[in-house]
Amino acid sequence: MTTTLNFDTAPGHQVLAAAGKTILRPGGKAATEQLFAWANFQPEDTVLELAASFGTSAIALAKRFNVHVVGVEKNPDSVAKARENIQAAGLSDRITIIEGDIFQLDKITDKFDYVLAEAILTMQSDGGKAKILSAIKNHLQPEGKFLAQEMFVRSDESEVRKSLSQSIRVNASPLAIAEWAQACQEAGLNIQQQQTGDMNLLNLGQMLQDEGLWGTVKIAWNVLTHPNLRHRILRMRRSFQQQRHNIGYIAFYAKLSNS
Ligand SMILES: C[S@@+](CC[C@H](N)C(=O)[O-])C[C@H]1O[C@@H](n2cnc3c(N)ncnc32)[C@H](O)[C@@H]1O
């Protein structure tokens, strides 16, 4: 593992990525699979992915469903890694990664059959969520579907937000289940189906499911051999554990309210 990251202060997803974690979303691969099942992708459909990170979901989509994906990602290192992964998968003609900010989606003039957003809205303020959801609405075809997985909170919202933000070191503002529906509705999107579950991102069972045996062994090795990394990941894990009765993941799909 080679990285110049400061493990004490870096955003949680960058720390986990440095440890070798490739799936950085609360419901993991299983929730992504549920979104794919709801979507019913057809070959040549178009997908806009927000915060595409290393291109993991984009590659799965293009490979399995023969769709075209445009991914937007802000972090230049993640963009470079995503492009490398896409080229290695032989999917450069199907996936385009734009280095950019999802707060500036108006630079993209196309409308898409799907918009996919995983683990990105929770990081935004209420106003930020509203702005992004409204931009998502503007980028959907009339019959398009918005696919998302995020974190939800059951109770003690302000304490949960404080504890998570301190350990993840990015703004973590999960909404209650009804608030996610309301935020979508206010942006002109109606949730059609949803699934919720426990937040097990850093638990061994989900780690094995998401990263496979070899991936999990690699992560365990990195954690064992890098004390600063271990300290930080254990801190995040402790915070998830402490809040486990108050938080979970929500996966949902929504359509335009007037469709
Ligand atoms: C928690 S990770 C989730 C990544 C990916 N969606 C996944 O599920 O694996 C959050 C990602 O959002 C990206 N990001 C954060 N703010 C962004 C913004 N304003 N515009 C574009 N990407 C952003 C980060 O660089 C990071 O790759």
Image (spheres, rainbow, N blue to C red):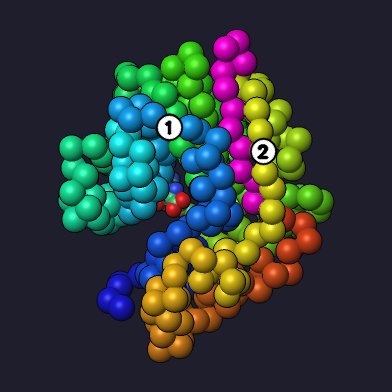
SS assignment at label 1: loop
10 Å neighbourhood of mark 2: few (<14), some, or many (≥20)? Answer: some
Q: Is mark 2 within 8 Å of ligand 1?
A: no
Q: Is residue 91 left or right of residue 166?
A: left
Q: Is mark 1 within 8 Å of ligand 1?
A: no
* Residue 186 visible to an observer of this rendering: yes
Instruction: Please name the residue shown 50% across and 17% down the image.
Output: 143
Look at the image and say whether residue 137 sits in the magenta stretch.
no
SS assignment at label 2: strand
Q: How many marks?
A: 2
Q: Nearer the viewer, residue 111 or 194?
A: 194
* Residue 100 visible to an observer of this rendering: no
Instruction: Please name the residue shown 30% across and 27% down the image.
Output: 44
Look at the image and say whether residue 256 sits in the magenta stretch.
yes
Does 42 appear above or below 18?
Answer: above
Residue 191 image-quadrant placement: top right
Image coords of residue 93 (percent x, y): 18, 37
The tag on residue 194 is: 2
**In which quadrant will I find the N terminus?**
bottom left
Q: Main secondary structure of the magenta part?
A: strand
Does 100 appear above or below 226?
Answer: above
Image coords of residue 232 (percent x, y): 52, 75
Circle 2: residue type? Gln
Residues drawn in magenta:
249-259
Q: Is residue 255 left or right of residue 212?
A: right
Circle 1: residue type? Phe
**Residue named by callout 1:** 41
**In which quadrant will I find the C terminus?**
top right
Instruction: Please name the residue shown 40% across and 62% down the image.
Output: 22
Q: Are marks 2 and 1 in contact (CB under 8 Å)?
A: no
Separation of marks 2 and 1 at Cα, in angstroms: 18 Å
